[in-house]
Amino acid sequence: MIEVLPIKGIGEIEPGADLAAEVAAALHSGGPVPLPGDILVVTQKIVSKAEGRFVDLDTVTPGAEAKRLAAIVAKDPRLVELVLAESSEIVRAVRGVLIARHRCGWVMANAGIDRSNRGPDRGDQVLLLPVDADASAARLREGLAAAGLDVAVLISDSFGRPWRYGVVNVALGAAGLPSLVDRRGEFDRDGRRLEVTQIAVGDMVATAAGLVMGEGNEGVPVALVRGVSFGRATERPASALNRALGEDLFR
């Protein structure tokens, strides 16, 4: 049976915080005791906060391209300048919508730059994604292991999806689990060989955790997912989930 357990008692995370120590303290003070095979899902937001990924828009000078796009999408030119800096490509720009291919390969609105749940007294600051989410997950896992907590770590964020309303959580970073399980070459119940089946385990776990973490004022940035079986699959980072640009069939 798969369980999703919210981790409570984690306060506002400030830049420079020892996130592993904060999470470990919450687990040691009444949180569920991690078991072998458990996965700790952590929102990107608190990872970015701890890593100091805040940018004050007052420090940003938009260039000509940012101003041009800002007029199209009706967004702050300073925000658009940051989106350009964080992206390798602008995929779509229409009024109210700016879709970018982030430098790490994710295709998302505003390159993941966010203003929600930043914490009090943040003025005109915005929050960027981690520089390397897989590396962030690995560091967090190492810090938790030093505190006596042996868990896999997954960093999640909420994405919209083409042709579907609503957001779901996906894996941005992962350590200690196979984010993508390749089952090509195996057989189904009728003996037919699987030719294209790859399982986005990281995204599935992230979305499951999102059911208890929420998207608004729930204040639950960490969850423990228990009971997921990976079979013989080996560890793979979340970057393995990004489809190669050459396989983009919608360009």
Image (cartoon, grey):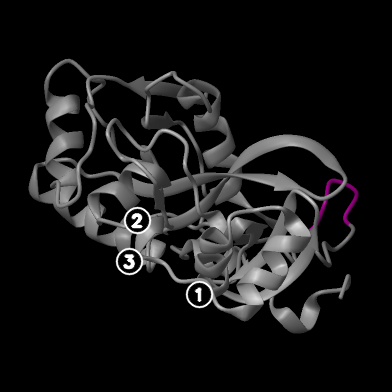
Q: Give the image location of residue 116, x and y in percent.
A: 47, 36
Amino acid type for the residue under numbered disc 1: Ala
Q: Quadrant of residue 73?
A: bottom right
Furthest residue in direction bottom, as rendered:
246
Amino acid type for the residue under numbered disc 3: Ala
Which one is nearer the viewer's eye here, 35 or 69?
69
- Residue at image x 74%, y 52%? 97
Amino acid type for the residue under numbered disc 2: Asp
Q: Can residue 243 be seen in this view?
A: no
Q: Give the image location of residue 186, x and y in percent.
A: 74, 62
Residue 188 part of the magenta segment: yes
Furthest residue in direction left, as rendered:
147
Assign a secondary structure to mark 3.
Answer: helix
Q: How many residues crowd around disc 1 within 10 Å: few (fewer than 14), some, or many (20 or more)?
A: some
Q: Mark 1 points at which residue?
A: 85
| Residue 212: mark in rendering | none
Instruction: Give the number of the mark in front: 3 or 1.
Output: 1
Q: Range of the magenta residues?
A: 187-191
Left or right, 217 with reference to 79? left
